[in-house]
Amino acid sequence: MKPLTIFIFFITTLLHGQTKSKDDFKLKGVWTVTKYTFCDISAMDDKIAQEWIGKKATVLKVIHFPYYNIPSYKDIFKNDCYCGYIDSRHLCPDTVISTEKYFSSYKINYSELGIKGKTIRLVRMLCKETPFGEVIVKNDNEIIIYWDGVFFTLTRDKK
């Protein structure tokens, strides 16, 4: 009976190490847009995408992003600079999806975004009509958002 107990413990530990709960990734913090990558077709040009560089998303009780400081987008988002993130109750369950399948509709090679894994983790929020409606978790310190044919990489600010 003892070898069976050890085997079950080993399998449980192995499986637990491969799954991630929503608590494993903490979105809260300050994130800075550090780079961008265009899809095959984009509504932006390089000049407009450059306007996003250096902008900070602050995630505390809401996601605050200063669209009003992006000249080409301030009229689109008007004064609406908050996303409905309040806590994990406002997040849809994390989704792990095939990297190949996810990016095939965007006509982009995901390696251009520095993604190497066969799967990606998506954090979806209830503010679907904003760039933060779906966040790709690259790692604990990098996330990617998509808007108007451009993938923006945001890096977590050091404390």
Image: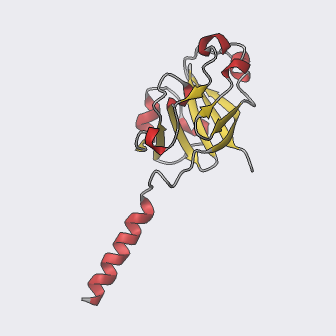
Q: Is residue 102 above or below residue 128?
A: below
Whole-percent x, y for residue 82 in the image: 59, 27
Q: Nearer the viewer, residue 18 or 115?
A: 18
The answer to whether residue 91 of the structure is visible from this angle is: no
- Please identify the residue farthest to the top as the structure is shown: 75
Whole-percent x, y for residue 134 in the image: 49, 33
- In the rendered view of the protein, which quadrant contains the N terminus? bottom left
Whole-percent x, y for residue 147 in the image: 56, 23
For the point 52% across and 31% down, the residue is: 84
For the point 52% across and 38% down, the residue is: 86
Q: Nearer the viewer, residue 65 or 37?
A: 65
For the point 64% across and 17% down, the residue is: 79
Instruction: Report whether 110 appears left or right of 57.
Output: left
Q: How many marks?
A: 0
For the point 48% across and 26% down, the residue is: 106
Name the quadrant containing residue 64. top right
Instruction: Report whether 77 appears left or right of 12.
Output: right
